[in-house]
Amino acid sequence: MNQEVDPNRIVIFDTTLRDGEQCPGASMNLREKLEVARQLTRLGVDVIEAGFPISSVGDFEAVQAIAREIQGPIIAGLARCIDKDIDRAAEAIEGNPRPRIHAFLATSEIHRQFKLRMARPEIIRRAVAGVERARSYVSDVEFSPEDASRTEPEFLAEVVQAVIDAGATTVNIPDTVGYALPSKFGDLIKYLFDHVNGIERAIISVHCHNDLGLAVANSLAAIEAGARQVECTINGLGERAGNASLEEIAMAIKTRHDHFTVHTDIKTEEIVRTSKLVSHLTGMVVQRNKAIVGQNAFAHEAGIHQDGLLKERSTYEIIDPASVGWTQTELVLGKHSGRHAFRARLEHLGYQLDEEEIQKAFIQFKALADKKKLIYDEDLIALAEHGMSEIPETYTLDYLSATSGAGVVPTATVRLKKSNADLQQDAACGDGPVDAALNTIERITGVEGRLVEYSIRSVTMGKDALGEVSLKARFAGNDRLIPGKAASTDIIEASAKAYLHAINRFLYEAEHPIRQPKDQAATGTTP
């Protein structure tokens, strides 16, 4: 095995920025991806899969920016076993001291027959050629036989043998569609160790999807069978039902050290902070009962449980909340706080804003401090994220007044400022004050849309708490779901700003379309 120092260390391969971002509506801009990459470095992940460089110009630029800035973790770029993919990935990660190209090709019978229309010998030839081309650029090459869990074991072993002989230093065994069961998946990993000559020359990895809710269980079964890298995401984010959750993998290994003989280098105290950052930036709210990072993960309501906890915490808690970063929300700033304290606290929370962004966020902070007596970390996070938007504000909200009530037709008057233009004002009715405000915004902008998702959550405690609105809309002439997010102590104002955020993004993307290869849609999924 290619782990000279410690054969019992599990390599944590984080694919939040690649597979996690493929979750519908979870896309991040370049600045947000850099913030996540910085936090993943603090968390102690071993490998950051920064993206799929060939998929779009934006993805290439994000991978390139991460590769140029982030030091410490291995920076990986994904590529199909196609020359142009591998060349593009190599270009994106060039200059990083620890670059990796991650090449993949489907191997299961159903993929060979219906997607690739290739016979077994051609699959092996393509896989070997892909690995060899990647090795011409970097010494660290990972290969994934896509849909490995549904591939015939004897053919899978043949593929693994061939790519290791070709120079692959890591071979990943993906459960691409979440089909595997833990005992069977563990048996598959054991089969490979028994039937692939020289398998110790490569690290065997696993990448499990959560379609049956078994991604973490399958990953742990693979570890017991000899796998030494796990591919996972923060909060289990990812396509369809998501991926194996990094925080659950790390804490299962740490908590059950009596069973597992392995360990990770994850700094577990950074887990909650990382979870919150990813949740806020993607707009994907973590379910309250999510293990480790959900708000209810360490909440105890039953009287018997509370009594036991007061007598001895370990009676009902197997994990110390502080060990994963759960601490009481810290009140640190108020209306008399200065820019230096404001910047320092944002940096402590993991945000690095430039001078212009700091100034914009600080002005909003002062306005918020005039409305709220208590300013919490979550309030600051909401302000920081608003300041990080890379989408130009074609329209900004200048004035909003809404009326509603029993026996009253809900009506909203809105005044918008268009960039380099005069103020525009209009009014409209709706089913409620939010609907009326959004209808008015559509009348002014001329952009018609339909809300597909809409949610409100309290950012912090108290009657004067910030209300954060996250929404996804589909606009005329565009099939893509466009996300929008905003926060205010007035939820109608937050809703209007969130919808404007989505409209501004729609207008920007209409003028700057995402470019991707013509054959990208026909290439199928990723590991």
Image (cartoon, grey):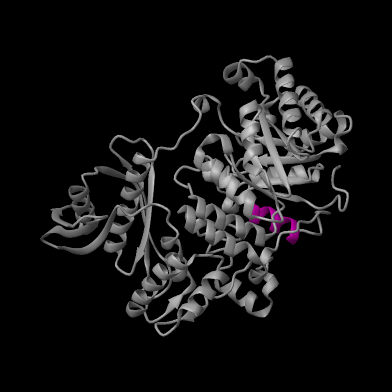
Dominant secondary structure of the magenta stretch?
A: helix
Q: Residue 224: x and y, percent?
A: 80, 45
Magenta segment: does it hold 310? no
Q: Residue 94: x and y, percent?
A: 67, 43
Identified at 79% across, 56% down, the residue is 263
Q: In this orientation, which residue lies closer to the viewer: 383 or 449?
A: 383
Identify the magenta region.
Answer: 246-255
Q: Is residue 283 left or right of residue 140?
A: left
Q: Do we see residue 417 in this rendering? A: yes
Relative to 418, residue 352 above or below? below
Quadrant of the rendered image containing residue 91: top right
Q: Residue 136: x and y, percent?
A: 75, 32
Q: In this orientation, which residue lies closer to the viewer: 211 or 482?
A: 482
Q: In this orientation, which residue lies closer to the viewer: 321 or 348?
A: 348
Q: Do we see residue 300 in this rendering? A: no
Q: Residue 399: x and y, percent?
A: 21, 64
Relative to 93, residue 288 above or below? below
Image quadrant for the N terminus? top right
Identified at 50% across, 56% down, the residue is 279
